[in-house]
Image (cartoon, rainbow, N blue to C red):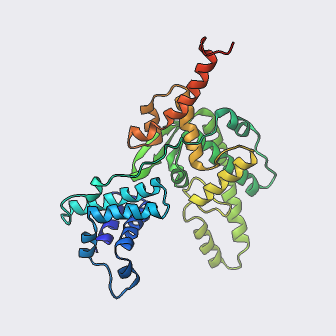
Amino acid sequence: MLLEDFKDYLRIKRRYSERTVALYTNAATDYLQFVYPEKLTQPTQPVTDQDLIDALNYQLIRGYVAHCLDNNLNPRTVNLKLSALSTFCSYLVKQQHLTTNPVKDILRPKEKKRLPSFFTEDSLKAYLDSPVITDNSIPNTYKAIRNRLIITLLFDTGLRRAEAASLTLSNIDLSRKTITIIGKGNKQRSVPLIDSLCEKIGDYLALRTQFLAELNSHICQGKKSSSQQTMTSNKTDQQPNAFFLTDSGKPIYLEFINRVVKSELEGAHLAGKKTPHTLRHSFATALLNDGADLNSIKEVLGHSSLAATEVYTHNSFEKLKEIYKTAHPRAKKK
């Protein structure tokens, strides 16, 4: 099946994550559901490869866009679906199943420009500089230090949520003060670490070692037989190279980071969206406001094009207008 071949192409050739592969294939499936609603609900009449190719034409895709908008999907979501469908069509062109990509001729719905939300350096300073509340328990202390480091790392490096979740011990080089990140499309980049962050990472790693030792000790004590001890110990140490660990010693995951960010920033009484991406936006906006050039910010963030980075100039421009009103002699109130 062509759709299955497309999945393999995304995984193997493009090296996309499973989440991204699912987004692309779900978009194609959603389109086929629009074109062949009866066939997809009746297993006895499956959509064939020829059906799929016949469905990929300008008129039907244009009707699909209208269908999406009529069902109150916002233009951004529709455009994401079209982008995924366009990638599928481009793949089919390469495989000589289509002669042209029909999505390229589709007029995209106009999106409202949205400025990325962000926290100012001053608003985060009180939280980042405040002492971490801990107790004498290593697990509770580890949890508190880990949660603070997740916020600090996201703000000080601009990592994406998935990049933070997939960090391993080998990605961190404190001697060179750099962090190696495997980003979108399996692209690798290095981001410098500031001195204060290096210190926090060093403290965290020492505590992480104590946390794992105590965790393994408790697990072994709770088992009755040596065979059970071995099985449990191996299970706990399956991925000891993961940089961040959950309270049970397993590698963290995407939703875990979401919960930590929301909990920590709500506790700091910060206004605005409390998400990992907001911290990434905050990092980029702070760099731009402090004089970093767009190309440098693009490289640090791991953007594939400068257009994705230019959105931060809007935030910077708002600050420029404030400075202008305050400093310009003819803009001052008399």
Rendered image quadrant of residue 290: top right
- Please determine whether, in this image, residue 333 is positioned above or below residue 251: above
Q: Position of residue 96 (x, y in %)?
A: 18, 64
Can you name the residue that lies furthest to the right here?
Answer: 136
Q: Position of residue 54 (x, y in %)?
A: 24, 71
Q: Is residue 30 left or right of residue 133?
A: left
Q: Position of residue 117 (x, y in %)?
A: 59, 42
- Please determine whether, in this image, residue 255 is positioned above or below residue 267: below
Image quarter in which the N terminus is found: bottom left
Residue 252 appears in the rendering: no
Residue at 36% x, 55% y is 83
Rendered image quadrant of residue 29: bottom left
Rendered image quadrant of residue 332: top right
Residue at 70% x, 39% y is 128
Residue 150 appears in the rendering: yes
Residue at 66% x, 45% y is 272
- Please determine whether, in this image, residue 227 is positioned above or below residue 111: below
Of 323 and 139, nearer the camera is 323
Can you name the residue that lies furthest to the bottom here?
Answer: 44
Q: Position of residue 137 (x, y in %)?
A: 79, 55
Image quarter in which the C terminus is found: top right
Of 332 and 51, nearer the camera is 332
Residue at 33% x, 61% y is 62
Question: How many labels, in total?
Answer: 0
Of 186 and 261, nearer the camera is 261
Of 145 and 273, nearer the camera is 273
